[in-house]
Image: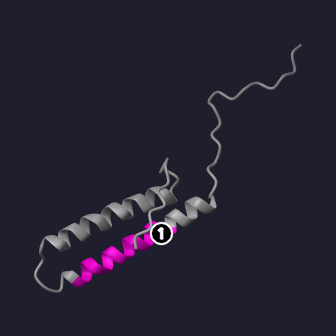
Amino acid sequence: MDHRPTPPAWPTAVAPKMTFKRAACGILWTLYTLLLAFNVSRLTEGPVDSTTVVFAVLAFLCGWYAYRIWTFQARRLVFFIIF
């Protein structure tokens, strides 16, 4: 009789690990999101022009990427520093 363990019916997934690079990128992109969202809120006090719309779109895209970083959905991490 064979006493080897039977393999699982589906492959087991390895849980992703939080690395320093992922945390640093996540914090950086979250700060970009907050900075752009703050600027959008300040720009909407007056008439809404194209700058407000561009900042709103950039804030949304930065927030979406930050969400993907924190939920381990981003395959490539971009460490982008704006001076």
The answer to if 43 sits in the magenta stretch is no
Q: Which residue corresponds to the image point at 36% horizontal and 77% vertical from the top-left?
A: 35
Q: Amino acid at mark 1?
A: Leu
* x then y, percent, for residue 53: 18, 69
Q: Magenta residues?
A: 27-42
The answer to if 33 sits in the magenta stretch is yes
Q: Which residue corresponds to the image point at 39% horizontal and 71% vertical from the top-left?
A: 32
Q: Quadrant of residue 31?
A: bottom left
What colouring style does the render use? Answer: one colour
* Residue 16 appears left or right of 67: right
Secondary structure under tag 1 reads helix
Majority SS type along the magenta span: helix
Query: On screen, 42 above or below 22?
Result: below
Outermost residue on the top side: it is: 1
Q: Label 1, on which residue?
A: 28
* x then y, percent, for residue 60: 31, 64
Q: Quadrant of the N terminus?
A: top right
* Residue 1 appears left or right of 39: right
Q: Quadrant of residue 80?
A: bottom left
Query: On screen, 24 above or below 42?
Result: above
Q: Quadrant of the C terminus?
A: bottom left
Q: Quadrant of residue 54?
A: bottom left
Outermost residue on the front side: it is: 83
Q: Which residue corresponds to the image point at 28% horizontal and 79% vertical from the top-left?
A: 39
Q: Which residue corresponds to the image point at 50% horizontal and 69% vertical from the top-left?
A: 27
* Residue 55 appears left or right of 16: left
* x then y, percent, for residue 50: 13, 70
